[in-house]
Every structure is written in C-alpha cells, then in structure tokens.
Image (cartoon, helix red, strand yellow):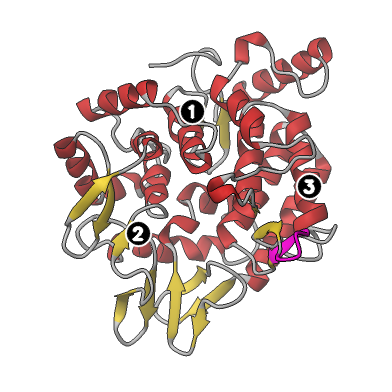
Amino acid sequence: MSGSKPMGWLYAGVMSLLLLGPGAVSADCDWPAWQRFRQDYISEQGRVIDPAGDRHVTTSEGQSYGMFFALVADDRDTFERLLRWTQDNLAAGDLTARLPAWLWGRNERQQWTVLDPNSAADSDLWLAYDLLEAGRLWQNRRYRVLGTLLLQRIAREEVADIPGLGPMLLPGKVGFAREQDWTLNPSYLPPQLLARFAGFDGPWQAMQSGNRRLLLEAAPVGLVPDWVVWQPSRGWLPDPKAGSIGSYDAIRSYLWVGMLADGDPDKAQLLSHMKSMVELTVARGMPPERVDVLTGEASGSGPVGFSAALLPLLQGTAAAEVQRRRLAERPAGERGYYDAVLTLFGEGWDQRRYGFNRAGELLPNRGDACTSSR
C-alpha cells in the first residue's frame, strides 16, 4: 500500500461522515450492489438473512462477509450493527470469551435461537480480519483489540498441528479431527488473510506452507475440491461425504487466488495450477456448477455468482468480458444470498472497489474513483 493512500481514503471517509451523518456514503462512492445487498438481506438489527428455502437463517459466514463489504463501503454504522448482532446472538454477548455459533434461526418450537453451536472457522477468520482492518483503517482501538483476541482464540480452538502438514485451520471447533484423519476445506483460508495474520504471534506464518500445499496437492488436475481428507500415511483423499467434487465451496478458492496481490510470491504458481478452471469456463461459456477434481469432468452450469467469483481469475482473457455480460444480464436476485455475496466479492474487485496488498491489507478504492470500472 502506498504511503498516502490510506490517509486519503480515511480523510474522505471522515468528511463523508461529517457532511452526511453516521453510516452515510458519499454520492461519489456509491456501491449499488452493496446497497441492494444491505436492503435485501440485512435487518435493521444487523442480521444477515439467507431466505433460501424460506428458513430465513443467519450464519456466521453471512455476518462476517457483511462486515467486510461494509468496511469496503466505509459504512461504519452497518459494520457496527452487524458486529453487535453477531456478538449478542452468536457469541452469547462476548466475542472475547467464545467463538460465534455458525447457525441461527427458528427451532422446532418456533423460537429464534442458535441452531448449531459449533463454529465455522472461515467465518471466524473473516471476522478477525474485518475487525483488524477496521481498526487499522478507521483508527479504532476497540476493533483492533477485539480482532486480536478473536484471532488468538481461533489459534487455540480451531488450529491443529497435523502430522506431515504442520499447523492447519480446521473447518470448525468440533468434528473435523479424528485419529490420523483430518477433514479440511481449501476455501476456508484465503491466502490474503493468512498473509495479514502472519505478523501476529501464533501459527499463522507457519501455516502458509501447509495452505499452499492444500491448494496445490489436493487439486491434482488444477480443480479444487469442496472438502478433502488428509491422512499422514496416505496423503490427500476424497471426503467420504462430499466425494471428489468441487462446487459451491470450492468456487471461493479460485476467487481468493485471483485476488492475490500481483507481488504475492505464490500467485503465479497458483494461477498456473488453476488454469483448468479457466479452460473449462472458456470452453463452456460459463463456469461449470460441478467438477470432479480427480478426472476433470465438469457438469451443469454454475449460477451467476460463479461468474462473478471467477472474474479475478479470468483477468486478461476474453472470458472475463463474457462473464461481465452475464452478470449484467442476470444480476443476483433478492432471494439469491450466495450469488449476491459472490457478486460483491468478485465484481467489486473487478470494478476496483477494493484489493489486497502483499501483506494482506485491504486496499479500499484501488482505482482512481469509487465508481471506476474497467
């Protein structure tokens, strides 16, 4: 990050708040996709609602993603509301004392409550990242402290020292580590976040090599699985439940790699390794919905969110413009929470609304203006 950029962005954000009031975003920095997401999916109390199947549940994933987008949009009021709801309802009022539960909704007695108290490690990492970056960009000590404490708890409760791999992030606190058998999800640990955490005490710097191996070795033909099992005596194996399929989870792995900073030492190797997904998308005109990561066989047409998620990976190819047109013609609807999330991530990056530097720090508005696009 350049020396003047953060302060310039911070000054603009402060002036926006002074002139327009808390949580307001200046006209020059409008982000229509974020504004639609906020209207369609976020309650007044700060709950991100997934309407799929009419269950209207909330996940810690949705809360953490919402906070990230609010940070990019310099929407401080929404960020705080999302944080407060997450802490009060998913962490029993104290994020410093417990990891948030991953699922909240209506139980069999029609009561709104935690439905599954287990944690989701990817959401926890994004929450820690959101807080640390909000603390840095907004000069907010409370966010920095809370993010640091949460990161320490993640290291204690969701990281395992796995034989043959070293320290690795487990998908949750419970249920993913058995005797000589560990279940991992490649999409749960974006390399950018790991780069950001590498400067903190804990397993994060050492975890970078294991995470790189996961993205490379668990994808033998360059296609990433949703889930994978590691056994020290046998190496990488398909997950007994998910099989060798890459689909709705794995699409995020391509997204994270595509958004790596140009100077990242692993970017070129990872991009080259994942060229199979680029080739499939070019040949089919859109991303496949499912791939067999061992045979390379693809099936189905991925939803519009997949097109958005692959925009960073497709930079410099004709396929990128094809996917942009698909997004323009078929935007995520008001009941497509996951499509909307992937669109905010992929299209937002493509429109230069944000990026990451080599240290994993967030670069808000990396273009010349908030509304700039290619």
- Quadrant position of the N terminus in the picture: top right
Quarter of the figure with residue 347: top left
Mark 2 element type? helix
Closest to the observer: 106 or 103? 106
- Left or right, 129 with respect to 304, comes to right
Q: How crowded is mark 1: few (under 14 residues within 10 Å), some or many (20 or more)?
A: many
Q: Quadrant of residue 103?
A: bottom right
Q: Distance between the residues labelled 2 and 3?
A: 33 Å
Closer mark to the observer between disc 3 and disc 1: 3
Tag of residue 116: none
Q: Residue 54, image x and y in percent? A: 59, 48
Would you place residue 323 above or below residue 91 in this image? above
Q: Which residue is drawn at 65% across and 65% down?
A: 154
Which amino acid, mark 2?
A: Leu
The image quarter containing residue 294 is bottom left
In this view, the residue in front, 164 or 349, is 349
Q: Name the residue under label 1.
A: 348
Disc marking residue 85: 3
Cα–Cα gap, marks 3 and 1: 25 Å
Mark toward the start of the polypeptide (2 vs 3): 3
**Amino acid at circle 1:** Gly
Which residue does the numbered mark 2 point to in the structure image?
215
Residue 113 within the magenta-colored segment of the rendering: yes
Which of pointers 1 and 2 indicates the residue nearer the eye? 1
Is 336 situated above or below 253?
A: above
Quadrant where the C terminus sits is top left
| Residue numbers of the magenta segment | 108-115
Q: Which residue is drawn at 49% across and 58% down?
A: 188
- Give the SS element for disc 3: helix
Q: Which of marks 2 and 3 is in front?
A: 3
